[in-house]
Image (tube, rainbow, N blue to C red):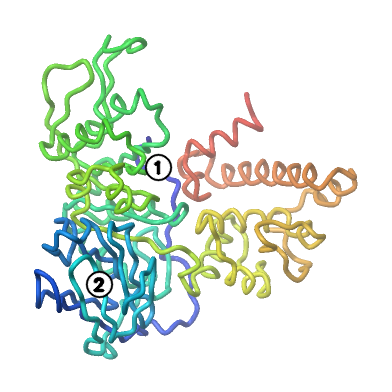
Amino acid sequence: MTEHDDGGFADATTVAVPNLNLGELPSASYVFTVIEGPDPGLQLELDAMRPSRVLIGTSAACELRLSDRHASRRHAAVEIAGRHVRLTDLDSTNGTFVDGVMIGEAFLRGGEVVRMGASALRVDQGPSLAGAALPGHTNFGKVLGASVVMRRLYPLCERLAASDVPVVIEGETGTGKEHLAEALHGASSRCDGPFVVFDCTAAAPNLVESELFGHERGAFTGSVAMRKGVFERAHGGTLLIDEIGDLPLELQPKLLRAIERAEVTRVGGQHPLQVDVRILTATRRNLDRETQHGRFRDDLFHRIAVTRIELPPLRRRQGDVSILAKFFCEQAGASPQLLPAALLARWESFDWPGNVRELRNAVARWLAIGDLDDAGVESGGNVFDAEPSSSRAPFPSRGDVIGQIVSLDLPIGEARQKMLDAFERRYVEHVLDVHGGNVTRAAAAAGVARRHLQRIKAKYDPG
């Protein structure tokens, strides 16, 4: 876990973005109306200004809550996808049917009848939103993006930052969930308090409880001193519980109790301690399915998911790849003009399974060994394959490093690693020099966590 980890973007407000039509907005809206079953007339309105999917089912967590005993607790999810509605079955017991056909996922355009359990819902197009406009700004704190799907998120983020409600941030690996959590903290009234991150996948299973709630001296073998847990360390600020979907099931009731009572008891302790903490959680897992299958407690989910934000994958963020790539280039101290147009076009069409994190690594790799890639290095489905460019050196030259490594006639894997090592060492030396040896400022400028920069530095300068 970290306290105010500097592993996010630098000041995203300095980034220039292309001349986008910032007012564009998919104009469709939809209304789901129950026409058969125990809840006739019940409705759900859905439009493009709702940035996240909403649930249909019998659970209290569902926005369209059915009383149909044949429907599952979290039966299905719906969200606007362009000018259509994406309907997703959430591994329901009895299935979801569109016009009589069982579906896993389907795109609706109005006029369909959806069946869940003993209920039928008619899907109708609602009033046009053609006059509605999206916000013109292209970032929320350190979260950067000018695509429609990202700009739809910003108004909700601003409202959530002004409140103190728990938020679940969902999204694939590398979409920037921790960056968004830090941005919510930074725009909140708690911004002067600590921002503490606890990663449920980083702690040993037998130490998770101690990391969360702390322990007293002698509570277990090796506990030679009292230690505060992340709840205490986040007192007066914000606690992000990252990858909460990986929290062991047996600890979930204890976490629920701590959140509901705003108090913790250290392992080995006798007296509860009051804590004032805003809870944010993040997960790459589908918590709806995890809850449906009994791997995540429904009562804990209901407590933490007062509001949900789902960060879209990079492949759905049209136009953001080029913006982010140029931003990462500037972060590395290089000119965005070094990225060839053909390369950016190829990157725009790539799926990016690792999302923004993978793109950042791709930019670093291009700046380091772009010439080697032109020689035929392939990675990630040829995302680095682009037209040769003769002016790519982003840092002052120290001789033809690439030429020297190539002349060693090493296997390409070894040559690539030597090039990456040379780039890492030179980059760390440069960024530390620019910031007078201050590791915290250098890490922020590099867009990595302070501890990560220290690890790289120690690798090449163990003294």
Q: Amino acid at mark 2?
A: Arg
- Give the amino acid type for the residue marked by disc 1 in the picture: Asp
Q: Quadrant of the C terminus?
A: top right
| Residue 174 in the image: above or below residue 67 | above
Report if the CB atoms under discs 1 and 2 are less than 8 Å apart: no
Q: Is residue 146 above or below residue 299?
A: below
Identify the secondary structure beneath mark 2: strand
204 and 322: which one is in front? 204
Mark 2: few, some, or many residues within 10 Å (few <14, many ≥20)? Answer: many
Picture coordinates of residue 247 (x, y %)? 33, 37
Residue 122 vs residue 282: left or right? left
Q: Using residue 416 as the reference point, say whether residue 150 is left or right of it.
A: left
User: Dot 1: within a 10 Å radius of its alpha carbon, few (fewer than 14), some, or many (20 or more) residues?
Assistant: many
Q: Earlier in the sequence, mark 1 or mark 2?
A: 1
Picture quadrant where residue 221 is located: top left
Residue picked out by circle 1: 5
Q: Nearer the viewer, residue 214 or 209?
A: 209
x and y, in percent, of residue 226 in the image? 26, 16
Q: Position of residue 213 (x, y in %)?
A: 24, 27
**Residue at 53% from the left image edge and 55% from the top image edge:** 354
Residue at horizontal 39 percent and vertical 76 percent from the top: 148
Q: Quadrant of the N terminus?
A: top left
Task: Tell me where residue 138 sits by quadrant.
Answer: bottom left
Which residue carries the number 2 mark?
115
- Measured Cα–Cα span from mark 1 to mark 2: 46 Å
Q: In what element is the residue under mark 1? A: loop
